[in-house]
Image: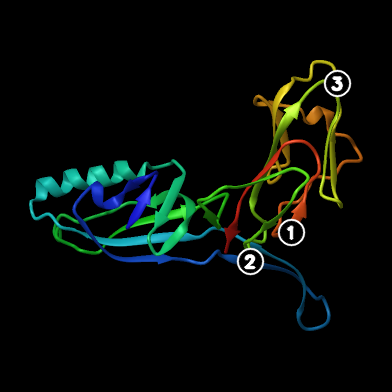
Amino acid sequence: MITFNGIPLASVAPVRVDDIAVSSVRLTVQARQRPVRFGADYVRTTGGTRTVTVTFALLTNDRTHRQEQLRQLAAWADIGKIHKLTMSDFPDVYLECLCREYPSPTVKTWWDGRLRLVFETQENPYFTSITEHTAACGTAFHVLGDAPDGPLMQIEGTVGAGAVTYSDGENSMTFAAYSGRPTGDLVIDLNRQTAAVGGVSIMRGYTLDSTFILPQAGTHTITGSGTVRWRERWL
């Protein structure tokens, strides 16, 4: 079973899925070539995207109906839009993908059973937990996962008239008050390093001595007022 944007593939057209191939995240090693000695000096390893290739057969003999069903499959793939993709062999997690390739049948071999849909991750290449976890600020919580960029994590709180500070014991973020700063529900996105109240950025109040808290696996306690929300991620 495979679903995209909450819609099962099997509900769109009568298909027989032959294979689902999930690639690993493409790794790129950055190194500086040594000018004299053999070898190179390692700098870092960065990761790119991953693909999900769905190979299937369309179980319809009528050519006209097949073409209509292929159009329905293209509409299901929602070209150019990123949605959550789930697979029964990877329970409790999803990938954020867009369709990179949809079926290209030929007129001559219209019965071809090797049709393909190819999905590709973009900003978030990791398997991400469907379940969102929460913890109150000031209480210890434990985060699982092995994604190098850590979990998806944000802090939700309330902004009044004064400054707001959050800390994990090593990094501290302070958002000072300023003229015209909105009040109300605060959302701090630790992955994007942004803070907004009602969709309006308050990064203008981010103090120079502040350091954003890093989303990462392990046990943490974030002090302040509000709630920490996170989704665990894996390679």
Side of 135 where 12 appears, left or right: left
**x, y percentage for residue 96?**
49, 50
**x, y percentage for residue 21?**
39, 66
Type of the residue with mark 3: Tyr
Type of the residue with mark 2: Thr
Disc nearest the viewer among 1 and 2: 1
Q: Residue at x 50, y 60 (%)?
A: 50
Q: What element carries label 2?
A: strand
Type of the residue with mark 1: Thr
Disc nearest the viewer among 3 and 2: 3
Residue 160 image-quadrant placement = top right
Label 1 belongs to which residue?
219
State the separation of the CA atoms marked 1 and 3. 34 Å
| Marks 1,3: beta carbons within 8 A | no
Q: Which callout, 1 or 3, points at the residue further toward the start of the chain?
A: 3
Side of 60 where 71 appears, left or right: right
Q: Which callout, 1 or 2, points at the residue further toward the start of the chain?
A: 2
| Marks 1,2: beta carbons within 8 A | no
Disc nearest the viewer among 1 and 3: 1
How packed mark 3 is, by other alpha carbons closer than 10 Å (few <14, some 14-19, many 20 or more), is few
Residue 109 image-quadrant placement = bottom left
Q: Which of 135 and 194 is in front in this view?
A: 135
Q: Residue at x 35, y 55 (%)?
A: 2
Q: Which of 82 and 36 is in front in this view?
A: 82
| Marks 3,2: beta carbons within 8 A | no
Which quadrant of the figure contains the C terminus?
bottom right
State the separation of the CA atoms marked 1 and 2. 30 Å
Label 2 belongs to which residue?
28
Label 3 belongs to which residue?
178
Q: What element carries label 3?
A: loop
Q: Which callout, 3 or 2, points at the residue further toward the start of the chain?
A: 2
Which quadrant of the figure contains the N terminus?
bottom left
